[in-house]
Image: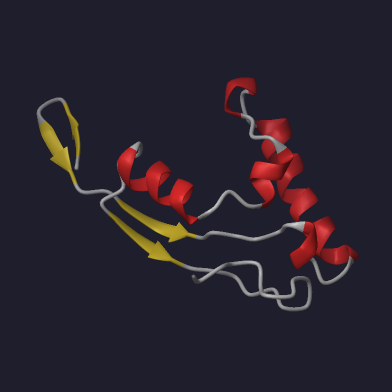
Amino acid sequence: MYRKDGENYFIVDAHVALWDARPENQRNIHGKQFIDCFYDYHRNLSPESELWPYEDYLYYGGERLMKDLFVDGYVDHAIFQPARLGAFYRTGFGQTE
């Protein structure tokens, strides 16, 4: 629960995904192009203090996702919406495990 100015707020993150764009999961060049496009937005639009290393951006794991959202973050409830993108990624882009 997030608290500000004496008020409590229940936070719902309505679009959560754990993607896997590691090279071994890329089915073809389009998988690399897809994640590189996302990373370019991140790299060019984020403050320098918030930039992630490219390898972390490709996949940072379920434990870190949970910590970022529920421990360090303010999320009380998350709606998990993975994207398959099976034409680009061998096991899918959005992980469900």
Q: Position of residue 44 (x, y in %)?
A: 73, 32
Quarter of the image containing the N terminus?
A: top left
Please, is residue 28 above or below residue 21 in the view? below
Please, is residue 15 above or below residue 68 in the view? below
Q: Position of residue 12 (x, y in %)?
A: 30, 54
Left or right of residue 89: residue 57: left
> Which residue is found at the position 72% from the left and 78% from the top?
86
Left or right of residue 3: residue 74: right
Q: Position of residue 10 (x, y in %)?
A: 20, 48
> Which residue is found at the position 78% from the left and 50% from the top?
37
Residue occupying the far top of the picture? 49
Please, is residue 42 above or below residue 11 in the view? above
Residue occupying the far bottom of the picture? 86
Which of the 4 quarters of the picture holds residue 51? top right
> Which residue is found at the position 44% from the left and 51% from the top?
63
Q: Nearer the viewer, residue 67 or 9?
A: 67
Colour mode of the rendering: secondary structure
Left or right of residue 7: residue 70: right
